[in-house]
Amino acid sequence: MNFFTQILHIVGSGATAYISARSMRDLQTRPDVLAAFQLAESGSVPFLEALRDRASSEGNDWLSERLDRHASDERRHGQIFAHALKQLNKQVIDFKKMPQKVVDGRPDERKQSPFFGAYFAGYSQDDLKPANIPWAVFFASTYILELDASHDFLRMANTLPEDEPRSANLKKGMISIAQDETGHAAYLREAMERYLGESATQRAIDEWRTRKVNAMLAMVSNFIQKAGKMPSMVQEGAPVEMERQESEKVAA
């Protein structure tokens, strides 16, 4: 990673930390931040479980066990964010009930975030499916995301006040999430070194760190184009209604 990219990484990380921390502290913007995290954490579970099964079928029990733990952690993280939303009488929008944009008579499936579009530039959606993604690509790309997430979650947690019950509970949960993310980054780094060796591992990390910087620039550019306006991902959810939904899920 060259010097200019390092500077962009430092500046970008600092700006992201400031914006995310401010958004988390503000009760007006907190629900959308929580919803985004809930979707990201819970949404990764099926992918990780499919990779776990793939590793097991390949005879890599060491990796399969760690992917299983990783999936379990992400499921718990989603539950933490969902509970924090519930305490604010909010819940994630049911996107399945929202109207889809139709192109040539079919739903438009080109709904990829600018961030991930830039981060995985050169890879098709088919390339990134659990059955197809090269292990080296999974290890390196996910390592960068998990490592940065561990720092981001801890920073956000440390900005939350402890004299307000909802914020105090969320702070504890986010600190535990940050610790989990640190553990995920550690096993992914070890997996890379086992698979690639130390020299190739560092080259892979440099490549995906550069990709992360480019992805952040793409995200900021998109944010500016939209004049800072982002669609809400939450809806009102009465506590009684949400309790009933959770009970139904358990019963099912």
Image (cartoon, grey):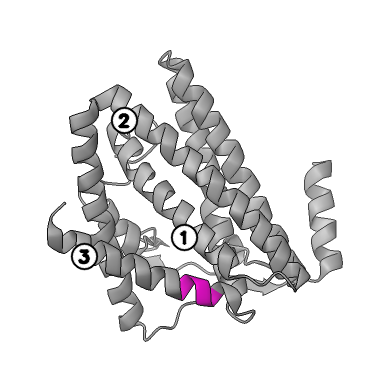
Residue 64 position, x and y percent, is 49, 23
x then y, percent, for residue 183: 50, 39
- Give the residue type at disc 3: Ile
Question: Type of residue at label 1?
Answer: Asp
Residue 16 image offset from top left, x and y in percent: 39, 69
Q: Residues within 10 Å of mark 1 (few under 14, many from 20)?
A: many
Q: CA distance from mark 2 to mark 3?
A: 25 Å
Count residues near mark 3 (Cα–Cα under 10 Å), then give few for <14, some for 14-19, many for 20+.
few
Quick one: SS at disc 1? helix
Q: Tag 2: Cα neighbours inside 10 Å, few (<14), some, or many (≥20)?
A: many
- Which residue in the protein does label 3 denote? 7
Q: Nearer the viewer, residue 217 or 134?
A: 217
Task: Give the distance between the C-alpha atoms of the residues marked 2 and 1, in whole angstroms.
Answer: 23 Å
Dot 3: element: helix
Rendering quarter of residue 196:
top left
Q: Tell me whether the residue at label 2 lies in contact with that at label 3, contact meaning CB atoms closer than 8 angstroms.
A: no
Q: Is residue 109 left or right of residue 248?
A: left
Residue 168 lies in quadrant: bottom right
- The residue beneath circle 2 is 192
Would you name the residue on which mark 1 appears? 152
